[in-house]
Image (cartoon, grey):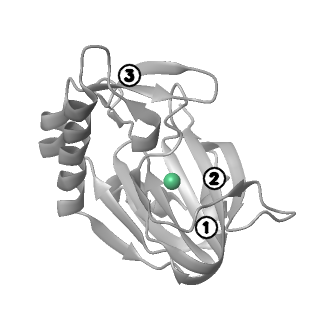
Amino acid sequence: MLDFIVEVEKKGYLVLDEANLLTLAKCEKFTIIRDVIISDADSADTELVASRCEFPFHTDGTFLTIPPKYVVIIVKEAQSGGQISLSNIDSTLKRTIIGMRAKYRSNTSVFESPIYNESLCMFRYRRDFMSPTNGMLDSEFQDMLDDIESKLTNRQILVGKIDPGYGIILNNHNFVHKRSEFAGRRVIRRIWLDINS
Ligand SMILES: [Fe+2]
Protein backbone atom coordinates (compact mmCIF):
# COMPACT_ATOMS: atom_id res chain seq x y z
CA MET A 1 0.00 0.00 0.00
CA LEU A 2 2.89 2.35 0.80
CA ASP A 3 4.12 1.90 -2.79
CA PHE A 4 0.77 3.12 -4.13
CA ILE A 5 0.84 6.18 -1.85
CA VAL A 6 4.38 7.04 -2.94
CA GLU A 7 3.43 6.56 -6.59
CA VAL A 8 0.28 8.68 -6.42
CA GLU A 9 2.15 11.44 -4.60
CA LYS A 10 4.87 11.39 -7.25
CA LYS A 11 2.75 10.97 -10.37
CA GLY A 12 -0.43 12.74 -9.19
CA TYR A 13 -2.77 9.93 -10.22
CA LEU A 14 -3.00 6.17 -10.37
CA VAL A 15 -5.41 3.72 -12.02
CA LEU A 16 -6.04 0.70 -9.78
CA ASP A 17 -8.62 -1.98 -9.21
CA GLU A 18 -11.50 -1.33 -6.82
CA ALA A 19 -10.11 -3.42 -3.96
CA ASN A 20 -6.78 -1.58 -3.92
CA LEU A 21 -8.48 1.81 -4.22
CA LEU A 22 -10.73 1.05 -1.25
CA THR A 23 -7.79 -0.19 0.83
CA LEU A 24 -5.92 2.99 -0.08
CA ALA A 25 -8.89 5.24 0.77
CA LYS A 26 -9.28 3.59 4.16
CA CYS A 27 -5.58 3.64 5.14
CA GLU A 28 -4.36 5.81 7.99
CA LYS A 29 -2.87 8.37 5.63
CA PHE A 30 -6.34 9.60 4.59
CA THR A 31 -9.66 10.67 6.07
CA ILE A 32 -12.77 10.04 3.97
CA ILE A 33 -14.79 13.26 3.88
CA ARG A 34 -17.47 12.19 1.39
CA ASP A 35 -18.38 8.86 -0.20
CA VAL A 36 -21.27 8.83 -2.70
CA ILE A 37 -22.78 6.72 -5.45
CA ILE A 38 -23.42 8.69 -8.64
CA SER A 39 -25.43 7.28 -11.54
CA ASP A 40 -27.20 8.31 -14.72
CA ALA A 41 -30.67 7.86 -13.22
CA ASP A 42 -32.51 8.40 -9.99
CA SER A 43 -32.54 4.99 -8.33
CA ALA A 44 -32.60 3.65 -4.79
CA ASP A 45 -28.81 3.49 -4.35
CA THR A 46 -28.07 6.77 -6.15
CA GLU A 47 -27.13 9.82 -4.12
CA LEU A 48 -26.27 12.11 -7.06
CA VAL A 49 -27.50 11.99 -10.64
CA ALA A 50 -24.94 12.69 -13.37
CA SER A 51 -25.69 14.35 -16.70
CA ARG A 52 -24.78 12.28 -19.75
CA CYS A 53 -23.15 15.34 -21.37
CA GLU A 54 -19.42 15.94 -21.28
CA PHE A 55 -18.31 17.14 -17.85
CA PRO A 56 -15.51 19.60 -18.68
CA PHE A 57 -12.24 20.11 -16.80
CA HIS A 58 -12.82 20.86 -13.12
CA THR A 59 -11.62 20.18 -9.63
CA ASP A 60 -14.02 18.62 -7.12
CA GLY A 61 -15.50 20.31 -4.05
CA THR A 62 -14.79 23.89 -5.17
CA PHE A 63 -17.49 25.11 -2.76
CA LEU A 64 -15.57 23.79 0.27
CA THR A 65 -13.15 25.96 2.28
CA ILE A 66 -10.46 23.40 1.48
CA PRO A 67 -11.50 21.05 -1.34
CA PRO A 68 -10.48 17.38 -0.93
CA LYS A 69 -6.79 16.76 -1.61
CA TYR A 70 -7.49 13.46 -3.37
CA VAL A 71 -10.48 12.15 -5.31
CA VAL A 72 -11.18 8.46 -5.92
CA ILE A 73 -13.52 7.51 -8.76
CA ILE A 74 -14.49 3.82 -8.89
CA VAL A 75 -16.43 2.68 -11.94
CA LYS A 76 -19.17 0.23 -10.89
CA GLU A 77 -21.10 0.04 -14.19
CA ALA A 78 -20.34 1.57 -17.59
CA GLN A 79 -21.61 1.00 -21.09
CA SER A 80 -20.27 3.38 -23.71
CA GLY A 81 -18.35 6.65 -23.50
CA GLY A 82 -17.33 8.23 -20.22
CA GLN A 83 -13.62 8.51 -21.01
CA ILE A 84 -11.57 10.26 -18.34
CA SER A 85 -8.91 12.88 -19.11
CA LEU A 86 -6.64 14.75 -16.73
CA SER A 87 -4.43 17.79 -16.93
CA ASN A 88 -1.70 18.85 -14.57
CA ILE A 89 -1.36 22.33 -13.04
CA ASP A 90 2.38 22.55 -13.67
CA SER A 91 4.76 25.41 -12.92
CA THR A 92 4.28 27.01 -16.37
CA LEU A 93 0.51 27.20 -15.93
CA LYS A 94 0.85 28.32 -12.31
CA ARG A 95 2.94 31.29 -13.41
CA THR A 96 0.20 32.45 -15.78
CA ILE A 97 -2.64 32.17 -13.26
CA ILE A 98 -1.05 33.44 -10.05
CA GLY A 99 -3.01 36.51 -8.90
CA MET A 100 -6.20 35.56 -10.77
CA ARG A 101 -9.28 35.46 -8.58
CA ALA A 102 -12.91 34.45 -8.98
CA LYS A 103 -16.13 34.30 -7.05
CA TYR A 104 -17.30 30.74 -6.30
CA ARG A 105 -20.85 29.70 -5.68
CA SER A 106 -21.87 27.17 -3.06
CA ASN A 107 -25.40 26.11 -2.08
CA THR A 108 -25.59 28.78 0.58
CA SER A 109 -23.15 31.54 -0.31
CA VAL A 110 -20.75 33.14 -2.75
CA PHE A 111 -17.13 33.65 -1.72
CA GLU A 112 -14.03 35.00 -3.40
CA SER A 113 -10.86 32.95 -3.72
CA PRO A 114 -7.68 32.78 -5.81
CA ILE A 115 -8.00 30.37 -8.74
CA TYR A 116 -4.58 29.06 -7.74
CA ASN A 117 -3.77 29.35 -4.05
CA GLU A 118 0.03 29.61 -3.86
CA SER A 119 0.38 28.98 -0.15
CA LEU A 120 -1.74 25.81 -0.29
CA CYS A 121 -0.53 24.81 -3.81
CA MET A 122 -4.18 24.34 -4.70
CA PHE A 123 -6.07 24.92 -7.94
CA ARG A 124 -9.82 25.57 -7.50
CA TYR A 125 -11.73 25.34 -10.77
CA ARG A 126 -15.31 24.65 -11.74
CA ARG A 127 -16.48 27.03 -14.44
CA ASP A 128 -20.22 26.75 -13.86
CA PHE A 129 -19.72 27.74 -10.21
CA MET A 130 -17.40 30.67 -11.01
CA SER A 131 -18.07 34.34 -11.77
CA PRO A 132 -15.93 37.48 -12.11
CA THR A 133 -14.75 39.45 -9.10
CA ASN A 134 -15.93 43.04 -8.68
CA GLY A 135 -14.59 45.34 -11.37
CA MET A 136 -14.00 42.63 -13.97
CA LEU A 137 -16.23 42.35 -17.01
CA ASP A 138 -17.86 38.98 -17.59
CA SER A 139 -16.43 38.91 -21.14
CA GLU A 140 -12.88 39.42 -19.76
CA PHE A 141 -13.49 36.71 -17.19
CA GLN A 142 -14.73 34.22 -19.78
CA ASP A 143 -11.71 34.98 -22.01
CA MET A 144 -9.44 34.34 -19.03
CA LEU A 145 -11.08 30.96 -18.36
CA ASP A 146 -10.99 30.08 -22.08
CA ASP A 147 -7.25 30.71 -22.01
CA ILE A 148 -6.75 28.54 -18.91
CA GLU A 149 -8.81 25.72 -20.45
CA SER A 150 -6.97 25.85 -23.76
CA LYS A 151 -3.66 25.46 -21.88
CA LEU A 152 -5.13 22.56 -19.90
CA THR A 153 -6.45 20.92 -23.08
CA ASN A 154 -3.13 21.30 -24.91
CA ARG A 155 -1.43 18.98 -22.47
CA GLN A 156 -4.25 16.75 -21.34
CA ILE A 157 -3.59 13.16 -20.42
CA LEU A 158 -6.16 10.72 -21.81
CA VAL A 159 -6.78 8.01 -19.22
CA GLY A 160 -9.60 6.60 -21.36
CA LYS A 161 -12.56 4.46 -20.50
CA ILE A 162 -12.17 2.81 -17.13
CA ASP A 163 -13.80 -0.61 -16.94
CA PRO A 164 -16.15 -1.62 -14.11
CA GLY A 165 -14.15 -2.90 -11.15
CA TYR A 166 -11.40 -0.31 -11.72
CA GLY A 167 -10.96 3.33 -10.92
CA ILE A 168 -8.58 6.19 -10.40
CA ILE A 169 -7.17 8.20 -7.52
CA LEU A 170 -5.96 11.69 -8.38
CA ASN A 171 -4.54 14.75 -6.68
CA ASN A 172 -7.46 17.20 -6.77
CA HIS A 173 -5.30 20.22 -5.85
CA ASN A 174 -2.93 19.85 -8.78
CA PHE A 175 -4.95 18.04 -11.43
CA VAL A 176 -8.20 18.84 -13.18
CA HIS A 177 -10.28 15.99 -14.56
CA LYS A 178 -13.02 15.67 -17.15
CA ARG A 179 -15.33 12.98 -18.46
CA SER A 180 -16.59 12.63 -22.01
CA GLU A 181 -20.28 12.12 -22.71
CA PHE A 182 -21.63 8.64 -22.14
CA ALA A 183 -24.58 6.49 -23.15
CA GLY A 184 -26.38 3.74 -21.29
CA ARG A 185 -26.07 2.93 -17.64
CA ARG A 186 -23.13 4.41 -15.74
CA VAL A 187 -22.60 4.11 -11.99
CA ILE A 188 -19.58 5.39 -10.11
CA ARG A 189 -18.56 5.57 -6.47
CA ARG A 190 -16.78 8.82 -5.70
CA ILE A 191 -14.75 9.25 -2.53
CA TRP A 192 -13.18 12.50 -1.36
CA LEU A 193 -10.07 12.22 0.80
CA ASP A 194 -8.16 14.60 3.01
CA ILE A 195 -4.62 13.91 4.12
CA ASN A 196 -4.04 13.28 7.83
CA SER A 197 -1.30 15.51 9.17
FE1 LIG B 1 -15.30 15.46 -10.66
Q: Mark 2 falls on what kind of element?
A: strand
Label 3: element kind: strand
Determine contact: label 3, label 1, CB under 8 Å: no
Label 2 close to label 1 by CB (< 8 Å): yes
N-terminal of the two: label 2 or label 1? 1
The type of residue carrying mark 3 is Ser
Q: Nearer the viewer, residue 121 or 75?
A: 75
Hey, what amino acid is under mark 2? Answer: Ile
Q: Mark 1 and ligand 1: say if the CB distance to the nearest ligand atom is below 8 Å.
A: no
Q: Is residue 99 left or right of 56 when viewed as pictured?
A: left
- Can you tell which quarter of the image residue 112 is in? top left
Q: At 38% from the left edge and 29% from the top edge, which residue is drawn?
A: 131
Q: Earlier in the sequence, mark 3 or mark 1?
A: 1
- Residue beneath label 1, please? 74
Where's residue 13, x and y in %? 40, 60
The image quadrant of residue 186 is bottom right
Q: Which quarter of the image is occupied by the N terminus?
A: bottom right
Residue occupying the point 41% across, 49% down:
58
Report the residue that reaches farthest toward the top: 135
- Residue corresponding to mark 3: 113
Residue at 49% over, 36% down: 62
In front: label 3 or label 1? 3
Q: Nearer the viewer, residue 152 or 32?
A: 152
For ligand 1, tell me if the residue under mark 3 lies within 8 Å: no
Which secondary structure, mark 1?
strand
Q: Can residue 8 be seen in this view?
A: yes
> Real-space Cα distance between discs 2 and 3?
24 Å
Residue type of the residue flagged with mark 1: Ile
Tag of residue 191: 2
Q: Farthest residue in the right direction?
A: 44
